[in-house]
Structure formats: C-alpha cells, structure tokens
Image (tube, grey):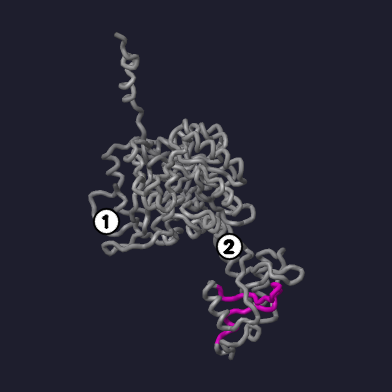
C-alpha cells in the first residue's frame, strides 16, 4: 500500500514550524550615544518617486478621516492628505481641486457683483460665500469697481435698495498676472486695500489676490507644495477604477493610491500597472504585507503601502485569519524594495508617536494614520457625546457602513444583497482631539525625540543607526505610566489608548 508522500515529508507538521512576527509593542529602540538634539532632526522624506514631504505623515483615505479640510491642514503642516473614494468621481475631483486651490496666491474662482444688483443682494451674497469684498464687473467681465463691507455700512447713507454702482469704489487698483506676491503686498499697503483684482490687457477680470491669502501662505513656510506652489494632495482610487484615476490625475492629484486591502492579487497588479502607465501622477500600490508582494509591484510602483490588518478598526485578521504584524511587515517590504529606491509607507497600527519612530526605524519612509486624525476638527466624521465626553465618528473602510457607501470593492467583494457583506472593519468613535496641527506637532515631536535617542540627524540615518530590542509583557507594562492615578492627561498620551 503506497504511503502519502506528504506524510513522509512531514508536510503538515512542517507548516507549524512558523517564523515569529513582531508589532510595535513587541520592540523598543535601543538608545545610543548621540549629539543630535531633537529640534535639529530633519524629518523630511519621500512618499513616492517624485513627491517629497517635510513631515513623514499621511492621513488615511477613509471617509471619516480625509476630505479637503483634512488634506489642506496636512499639506500646510508638511504632510499629505489622501482623499477617500467613498465619493462619486465628480465630487472626488472637486475635493482634490479644493486642496490644490486652497493656497493659490491668485484666486481664480472669484465672487463678483453686478453694478445693477442691489446693495442688500450683494451683502447677502458675500455673507453666503464667506467673503467681505467683491469686484464689480460688467457683462463682459470688465472690472468697473469693487464693493466691500465698508462701502455699505449704514453711516455711509447707502440704502439697501440702492444699486451697487452707487456704493462701489470705482477707482480700482488692479494688477497683471505677472505680479509677485511681495509686489502685491506692497501695493495693498501703499493704497490701504485688502484685495487687488488681476486683469488682462483689456481689463477683463482673471483673478483676485488678497492680503489674507499672501499672509496665510507665508505662515505655512514648511508646507508640502508642488513645483507651482500649490499644496500637495493624494487621492485613493480602486485598483480597477481607471476613470477615477484619470479624473483625479486631471484635477491635479500629486499621488494616486491604489486602494485595496490585498494588493498581492494578479488582477489588481495588472490593473494597477495599467493605471500607472496612463496617468502623470505618481502611483502608490497597496496594501501589502510581505516581501513577495513587494517584489511583484516594485518595478512599476512609485511607492508601496504596507499594512494587512493593523488598523484600530480593522477586523481582517480575526475575520479571515490572515495578516502580518506591522513591524515585521514593514521590515520585509523595506528589505525587498531597498535596491529599487522605492519609498515605503506604513499604514495602520500607530497609537503613539513612538510607534511612528519604530515604523521608520524598521524601514518605512512615512506613516499613514487613520484613528489618530479622525478625532480632529478637520476630519469629516460627526461629533457625538457619550458619558459627558466628546467623540468623533470613525469607521473602517471594511465596515458595513463604508461598504454600503460604495467601498465594498476595496475588499474585492461586490455582493448582490447587503446581507451578503462580509465586513472586515467596525464602526466606532474616537476621542475628540481639537486641531489637526496640534496632533501633528505632538506626533512629529515624538519622532524627533526618538531620532535624538538614536543619534540620527535625518530619516535615512535613523533607518541605518536604529537597533531594536525585544520587550516582554512585563516590559510593555513598565513602559506605560504605572502604580499611579493620572490626574492630568498629557497631550501625547491618553490612558484610554492603552490596550
């Protein structure tokens, strides 16, 4: 009687000789002799072949995390926001355009008034549009004057029923497209005005430059900007969504993120490669969790995103039994792509700023965060109050709600009936945190301190110098505040975050 060759070889028992995989809490950075002060550490990095950031942090492409407001705040503070794809294609392109236009020196979508509108009509229009002044133009868009709040105050004896031409300032200071921001600012100071219409040779209105816009741009000196000075922005697209990819590319997205839970899939790889050939934007492929996956996409990807199930609202590992602890996943992918000089983005699992330091030390060039930013003012999730504390809505893109919103194909499932959904995420709430800028400051500050402990002046040196030590369960407990009752929470540590 023939024996089973697998039995002779120990085929099944061999599967149980498994390698160990580690995540953030399993390791710590080994301190080293250093002359690097934290505020001297350079945290600038690349997230794709052609896109540099001053801060190695991205906000996740989730519908309770990143829309235009989050992406603008991220870019102004040196990072990158990735617009989610639970939007129709047209709205997604609008979101991208809002980010690209947010810090334009010259405003193109100008709110204008007609000389024959009434003062009350224009007053209501300016309040609705959130502006306090508007150029007055004729039917051919020639500038006739400018109207502002000061022109229609009651003490000026202007009636609400009067036409705008009765109240406007008709001696208008204009400028050409060639004017530099410094010149425009000097012009405004000289004439004691706050806005200057931009006109062509025939006095047609082509834009508007404001003092507020110029000063705001100066405020964000470390912002992530493209070669034209516009804010950087990313956009998520499905692996088979060629139309969304082309639309986001045309709208000006700097990086397209192939948004798939398991990118090591032959059809996904083929389609992602095709998208990369069709667009001008860089293309980051994800998510992957092994060296084999990285090798299969590295030849065409401008960046690789790592993370199979580490997110705080992700249930992939318990639902499917598949996944890879994040530190090991990052290290495997980084090793695989290092000869190709392709950036690695660690997506998920970060609870503290120290986790960011560990992710980069393990080989990542940047990290992507969801729950960390979901509680900020800029995130689109709604605010709820529970037990007297404020929270914001946060849900995984594999949750039933997100799938019903249109993102089911991220998990390569398109059921005919909602009852057939197999979710890989949950809907939850995360503590309300305030401004995104303050959260990012704490996050990057912790990273810089970690670089100081290792003696690394920049990200590349950090990856080279860093060494890990294993931590026992007792060591993990020792690393958190213990044997005390916390009376005042620190801005970068919340007891609720402790597992």
From where the camera sits, is residue 466 visible? no
**Where does label 1 land, which residue?**
486
Q: Is residue 140 magenta?
A: yes
Span colored in magenta: 131-153
Residue at 66% in and 72% down: 196
Judged left or right of residue 436, residue 475 is left
Residue at 31% in and 58% down: 489
- Report x, y in % for residue 367: 46, 46
The numbered dot on residue 100 is none
Residue at 39% in and 36% down: 468
Q: Nearer the viewer, mark 2 or mark 1?
A: 2
**Where does label 2 land, which residue?**
217
Q: Secondary structure at mark 1?
A: loop
Looking at the rendering, in which quadrant would you find the N terminus? top left
Vertical position of residue 411 compared to residue 120: above or below: above
Identify which residue, 237 or 485, lies in the foreground: 237
Q: Is residue 251 magenta?
A: no
Q: Secondary structure at mark 2?
A: helix
Vertical position of residue 77 compared to residue 140: above or below: above
- Report x, y in % for residue 14: 33, 21
């Amino acid at each position: 009687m023939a024996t089973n060759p697998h039995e002779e070889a120990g085929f099944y028992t061999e599967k149980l000789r498994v390698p160990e995989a580690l995540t953030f809490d399993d390791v710590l950075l080994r301190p080293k002799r250093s002359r690097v002060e934290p505020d001297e550490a350079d945290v600038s990095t690349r997230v794709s072949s052609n896109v540099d950031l001053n801060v190695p942090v991205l906000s996740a492409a989730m519908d309770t995390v990143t829309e235009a407001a989050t992406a603008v705040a991220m870019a102004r503070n040196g990072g990158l926001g990735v617009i989610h794809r639970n939007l129709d294609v047209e709205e997604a392109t609008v979101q991208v355009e809002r980010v690209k236009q947010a810090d334009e020196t010259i405003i193109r979508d100008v709110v204008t008034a007609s000389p024959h509108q009434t003062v009350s009509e224009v007053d209501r229009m300016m309040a609705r549009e959130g502006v306090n002044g508007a150029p007055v133009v004729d039917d051919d868009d020639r500038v006739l004057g400018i109207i502002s709040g000061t022109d229609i105050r009651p003490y000026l004896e202007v009636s609400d029923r009067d036409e705008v031409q009765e109240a406007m300032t008709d001696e208008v200071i204009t400028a050409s497209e060639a004017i530099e921001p410094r010149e425009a600012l000097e012009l405004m100071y000289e004439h004691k005005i706050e806005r200057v219409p931009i006109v062509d040779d025939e006095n047609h209105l082509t834009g508007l430059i404001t003092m507020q816009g110029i000063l705001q741009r100066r405020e964000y000196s470390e912002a992530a900007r493209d070669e034209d000075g516009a804010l950087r922005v990313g956009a998520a697209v499905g692996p088979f969504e060629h139309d969304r990819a082309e639309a986001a590319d045309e709208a000006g997205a700097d990086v397209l993120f192939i948004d798939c839970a398991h990118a090591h899939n032959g059809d996904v790889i083929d389609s992602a490669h095709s998208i990369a050939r069709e667009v001008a934007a860089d293309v980051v492929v994800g998510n992957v969790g092994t060296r084999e996956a990285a090798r299969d996409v590295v030849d065409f990807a401008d960046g690789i995103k790592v993370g199979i199930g580490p997110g705080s609202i992700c249930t992939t590992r318990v639902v499917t039994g598949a996944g890879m602890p994040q530190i090991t996943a990052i290290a495997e992918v980084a090793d695989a792509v290092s000869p190709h000089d392709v950036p690695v983005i660690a997506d998920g699992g970060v609870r503290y700023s120290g986790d960011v330091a560990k992710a980069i030390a393990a080989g990542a060039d940047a990290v992507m965060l969801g729950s960390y930013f979901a509680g900020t003012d800029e995130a689109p999730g709604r605010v709820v109050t529970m037990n007297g504390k404020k929270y914001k809505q946060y849900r995984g893109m594999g949750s039933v709600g997100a799938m019903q919103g249109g993102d089911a194909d991220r998990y390569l499932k398109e059921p005919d009936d909602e009852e057939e959904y197999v979710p890989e995420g949950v809907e939850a709430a995360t503590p309300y945190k305030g401004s995104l800028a303050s959260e990012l400051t704490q996050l990057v500050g912790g990273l810089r301190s970690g670089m100081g402990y290792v003696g690394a002046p920049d990200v590349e040196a950090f990856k080279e110098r860093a060494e890990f030590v294993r931590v026992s369960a007792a060591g993990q407990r020792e690393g958190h505040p213990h044997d005390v009752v916390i009376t005042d929470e620190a801005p970068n540590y919340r007891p609720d975050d402790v597992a």
